[in-house]
Amino acid sequence: MYNIRVEKISENIPRHKHLHFTAAFVPVCRFRFVGPLIMMLIFLSSCTVTAEDLTCSQLPQLMEAFQANHYAMKSTTQEIRQHAVDQMIKRLDPSKTLLYESDLEKLKEFLTDLFVSAEKGNCASLNPVYNLLVARAQENEAIVKKILGPDFRLDIMAVLNINIDKRPYPKTLEEKQGLLKKIVQFQNENLLLSGIDQATAKNKQIHRYELQTKRVIEQNPTQLITSAAEAFALALDPHTSYLPPKDYEDLQIDMKLSLEGIGALLSSDTGFTIIEELIPGGGAEKTGLLKPKDKIIAVAQDWEAPVDVIDMDMRDVISMIRGKKGTKVTLTILRQSDRRNRFDVTIIRDKIDVKDQEAKITYEMRKVNGRQYRFGVIDLPKFYGGEKGGKSSYEDVKKLLAGARRQRVDGIVLNLSRNGGGLLDEAVRLAGLFIGNGCIVAVKDSKGQVAILSNGLAAPVKEVDKQSISLGSVEDPRALYMGPLVVLTSRLSASASEIVAGALQDYRRAVIVGADHTYGKGSVQAVLKLPLELGAMKVTTGLYFLPGGKSTQKTGVIADVRLPGWFLSEDIGEAAQDYPLPAQAIEPFLDARGKDAPQWKTVDEPLIANIISKSQSRVAKDAKFAKIIKDNKEAADKKGIIQLDDFRKTMKKEGAGIEKKTRSEQREKAREQYVPFVNESVNILLDIVRLTDSEPS
């Protein structure tokens, strides 16, 4: 029998991530979906060969399996088919540069027929779809080559609408030519700012569109079946998705923060796979032969002939480079120097920890009336873990808190402003470090059953919707932190980070500081690994509820102290996604802590009101916040319209150009934008300490 694993996750996972490594994935939680899983076993075990591409005959059963496991969508309605058609069109032409407005009616007819006939294993409607895409890609390539001909001139007055959602499809050939001309102008300027000459910039752009045509042609009607499965999944809700094998590998890596590979970050540029950065301690760095900007032009497995990877899709190149610990891979490198230098490098693959996403702590000092205050700022970009003996966000934060106590900190800022979620178990255990025993989150399934996840012992709760409590391990009291606490959030804080922030808010344990509210992803996803190397399906199986009984779905966690956003946020959040599930509420379960009195000084409304007043006064005088507010207003006034001359000035001001920053420098620059928000969070923490006269914990 095939082994179908069900892994419960809690994260706002982007659909097209560029992750570059792989490792085995270990289940985190196990759910029982007996009926649907048996049905999937029957449908997939009927195949006797190993497959990597989804076939049309498998599509009906996959669609049924999505609905059998989904929290709310249990049958294929006309509305779901229409959603699937719309999602498919978005996937086929996400930039609205390929298709004409008149093409949409043809595609809608073909794709509507597809999602009806696919239920019977018939995908013939994909043939005319494929033919249309190839014709339009070839047309775009010809248009761009003409634009970049001898008469090409830079037009600094060119204006482009970069808000694709509000940009219409071109109606005529003339309109498409005009749109592509504007896009080419901006692409050309970006290349010039990177330090290359005009002739090279033109050749790179032409090659880019040639590659786009090649990619479309390679995506034959059979491979479009995968796109249909992905579109159908997205039609159910924003977080349900079909994960082809490569996407499933990416998810595995993302959850564990570990990989088995060569230890390099890669990018793609005009057909070349380029080494962007060498990870310290990785196999690539240990050779002493590789440098950033080296181009990988061929890949050879141990004892096998090299394979030319120029113009190959980067994800295929990455799949060739990935491999088990201890195995060898040989890269053929092209280095641009005084002369073109070509050489081979053999690397032993090894296990590497991805450091960027690990929890880290820094210390901030404040001096008031002669007294020195020390605060710890814990930055946690995601809730990672899942492998026995491997990385764990809970264990890492636990160690950081122990170090902070040795430093005798006066308070802690938990920075979740970049945290898109992660593993639920890690989030529940981590919340326990700040409240001790207590119920953290409830999960409601499609049958109305509610399971409450708790840290340590918990008192019985009144039975509502068949509630049950799942008890976690009891934390050593010496590991707990009960001092002043601020949680920094943003519109990017999603799912598991919302559970932690919301639980700490409901228990009046912490002051929540940040944007107006968090992302608003309050749904549960289970990842079902498919046999035959078909990848996995991620399906929404329930909703999360905070101890106060409210769901974070769509509304998120409302900040106690609101700071100006560092980006325009109208289109960021669950409510802005396609087909989000509605919010719900259940009976509160705060009383499940029992009779234990809080070990911390609770956050009350008078304290928050006082803090808000002080924070607003500081923010109004802060030059960095003033610039953020000004930049946001200017961006909002432009409504997605940008002029080439403004683009050039902005890029030069931000340091684009010949001296292009390394990936590490780019990350450091990105972190700088968070500085005013972290600083103000520390200031708010100081207010809390002084207003409550707390002693160090």
Image: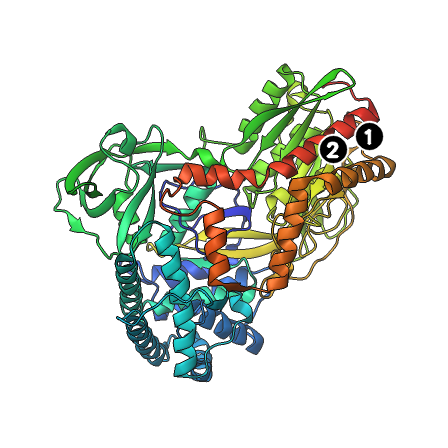
Residue corresponding to mark 2 = 684
Asked if 658 appears above or below 647 in the picture, the reply is above
From this viewpoint, is residue 392 visible? yes
Quadrant in which the C terminus is drawn: top right
- Percent position of residue 14, x then y: 49, 53
Residue corresponding to mark 1 = 595
Asked if 455 appears above or below 16 in the picture, the reply is above
Mark 1 burial class by Cα count in 10 Å: few <14, some 14-19, many 20+: few
From this viewpoint, is residue 471 visible? no
Task: Determine the residue positioned at 45% across, 44% down.
Answer: 655
Total number of numbered discs in the rendering: 2
- Percent position of residue 156, x then y: 44, 64
Name the amino acid, label 2. Ile
Which disc is residue 518 wearing? none
Rendering quarter of residue 109: bottom left
Question: Mark 1 or 2 closer to N-term?
Answer: 1
Q: Does the CB distance between marks 1 and 2 fall below 8 Å?
A: no
Helix, strand or loop at label 2? It is: helix
- Percent position of residue 436, x then y: 70, 28
- In the image, 590 versus 650, the foreground residue is 650
- In the image, 73 versus 290, the foreground residue is 290
Rendering quarter of residue 659: top left
Name the amino acid, label 1. Lys
Mark 2 burial class by Cα count in 10 Å: few <14, some 14-19, many 20+: many
Tell me: 188 left or right of 669: left
Task: Determine the residue positioned at 44% across, 55% down.
Answer: 16
- In the image, 442 versus 222, the foreground residue is 222
Query: How far apart in space, not on screen, are marks 1 and 2 (Cα)?
Result: 31 Å
Tell me: 385 left or right of 363: left
Rendering quarter of residue 275: top left
